Image (cartoon, rainbow, N blue to C red):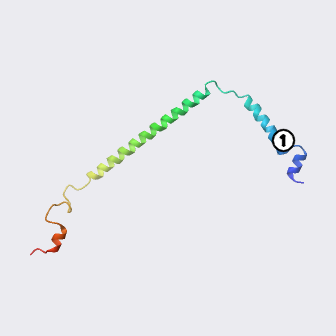
Amino acid sequence: MTYRDATESRGIGPDRTERELEKALQALAGGVTPAPDAYRTARGEWLRRERRRRLVLGVLIAVVFTLATLIGLWVLNQTPSDPGVIFSGAGGTAHASLARPQP
């Protein structure tokens, strides 16, 4: 004899347990009454959270954008003040100077 057979023979099967549980939950749910303004309160709280989330996201985007701009400007400002080899403006191109050696 299995466990299921033993419990069903005593009337403790899954069907009886489900029925009793359903009755208990219906009795519990029947005694619960929502507050008159529960929907309005929950919706207001949700809207406040949504507004706060959008505000935090906007501030975070502004901070990241500002920080990236400042870092970019700082990096560009770190270039040496003397002109480099590429932009020296002296003589012709590198190809022309390599083609003919100077006497």
Q: Secondary structure at mark 1?
A: helix
Q: Residue at x 66, y 27 (%)?
A: 34
Residue 45 picture location, percent across and down:
55, 31
For badge 1, the amino acid type reads Arg
From this view, report whether residue 91 is shown above or below residue 8.
below
Of the pair 44 and 78, the residue shown nearer to us:
44
Of the pair 79 and 86, the residue shown nearer to us:
86
Residue 17 picture location, percent across and down:
82, 41
From this view, report whether residue 96 is shown above or below residue 25.
below
Determine whether, in the image, residue 42 is placed left or right of residue 84. right
Instruction: Please state, as top left, top right, bottom left or bottom right, where the C terminus lies in the image.
Output: bottom left
Determine whether, in the image, residue 43 is placed left or right of residue 83. right
Q: Which residue in the rendered view is the most extreme toward the left?
A: 103
Q: Which image quarter: residue 83?
A: bottom left
Instruction: Please state, as top left, top right, bottom left or bottom right, where the N terminus lies in the image.
Output: bottom right
Q: Which image quarter: residue 27?
A: top right
Determine whether, in the image, residue 96 is placed left or right of residue 32. left
Residue 20 picture location, percent across and down:
81, 38
Crowd around label 1: few <14 · some 14–19 · many ≥20 (10 Å):
few
Q: Residue at x 73, y 31 (%)?
A: 29
Q: Which residue is mark 1?
A: 16
